[in-house]
Image (cartoon, rainbow, N blue to C red):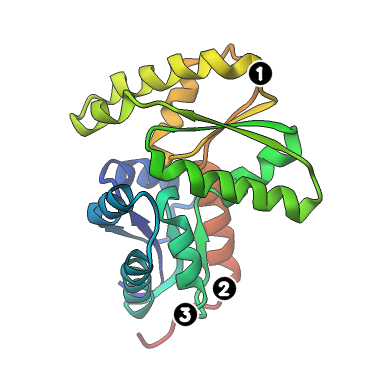
């Protein structure tokens, strides 16, 4: 399908998440979902991105561009740094889902909690928050929160238990933060379970998808793929 907004996922559950967002925010933009769980598996096995993973992610993104994607959005924070490598290899915009969230976080306050359910996601998200702070000249302190028990629930398909574990962990650190960042798009639902937290809880799907749709509308259409 030519002239699409391509989304690179590493978890199948995100297809529904972003399909719903598209229906609400940009029903006129055709989506192309690319799902490859092995990319996240490799990041977890290796403890982060590697040159080999950079090549694999770049290949997936370039294949999407070659098939007619006008814009490519990487929805997995763990492989976000690899998406930045791929950005240098194509004239098509390649976006990270967590970039707008990071920029918003540093504009809110200096004490930022980065919460994740996978250790492979903590470093990329912390790094993008710190990069956003440097870009704006802000001094921030980032505290990691690893919700270790949650991911096993998601792997079993227990999304409610996954969300509940995350929400319970957020309660513990909220008092010490100015803002909480949920590192993974799959964590977004947990924010709805703790509306009484005294600090903002930022999620990436909506703001990241909005940035991608804006890039789509301002990028020339793909022709003759």
Rendered residue at 49%/77% (across/down)? 221
Distance between mark 2 and mark 1 Cα atoms: 41 Å
Residue pointed to by mark 3 = 89
Rendered residue at 31%/68% (across/down)? 56
Element assignment for label 2: loop
Q: Residue furthest bottom?
A: 224
Inspect this view and state whether residue 76 appears: no
Describe residue 107's horizontal placement relative to residue 28 as left or right: right
Decide which of tag 2 and tag 1 comes sooner along the chain.
1
Quarter occupied by residue 49: bottom left
Rendered residue at 75%/32% (across/down)? 109
Element assignment for label 1: helix
Image quarter in which the N terminus is found:
bottom left
Kindly identify which numbered label has been placed on residue 192. none
Residue pointed to by mark 2 = 219
Decide which of tag 1 and tag 3 comes sooner along the chain.
3
Image height check: is 87 above or below 166? below
Quarter occupied by residue 67: bottom left
**Residue 172 spot, x, y in % from top left:** 53, 13
Front residue of 51 and 217: 51
Question: Which tag is nearer the camera, tag 1 or tag 3?
Answer: 1
Rendered residue at 45%/80% (across/down)? 222
Residue pointed to by mark 1 = 176
């Amino acid at each position: 399908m030519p002239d699409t907004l391509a989304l690179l996922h590493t978890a199948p559950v995100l297809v529904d998440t972003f399909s719903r967002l598209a229906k609400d925010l940009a029903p006129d933009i055709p989506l192309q979902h690319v799902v490859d769980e092995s990319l996240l598996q490799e990041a977890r096995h290796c403890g982060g991105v590697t040159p080999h993973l950079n090549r694999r992610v770049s290949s997936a993104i370039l294949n999407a561009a070659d098939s007619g994607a006008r814009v490519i959005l990487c929805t997995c924070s763990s492989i976000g740094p690899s998406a930045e490598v791929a950005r240098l290899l194509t004239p098509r915009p390649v976006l990270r889902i967590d970039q707008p969230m990071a920029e918003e976080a540093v504009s809110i306050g200096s004490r930022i909690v980065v919460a994740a359910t996978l250790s492979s996601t903590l470093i990329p998200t912390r790094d993008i928050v710190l990069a956003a702070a440097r870009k704006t000249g802000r001094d921030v302190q980032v505290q990691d929160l690893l919700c270790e028990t949650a991911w096993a629930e998601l792997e079993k398909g227990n999304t409610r238990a996954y969300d509940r574990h995350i929400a319970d962990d957020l309660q513990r650190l909220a008092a010490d933060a100015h803002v909480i960042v949920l590192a993974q798009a799959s964590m977004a639902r947990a924010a709805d379970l703790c509306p009484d937290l005294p600090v903002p809880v930022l999620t990436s799907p909506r703001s990241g998808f909005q940035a991608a749709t804006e890039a789509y509308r301002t990028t020339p259409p793909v022709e003759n793929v």
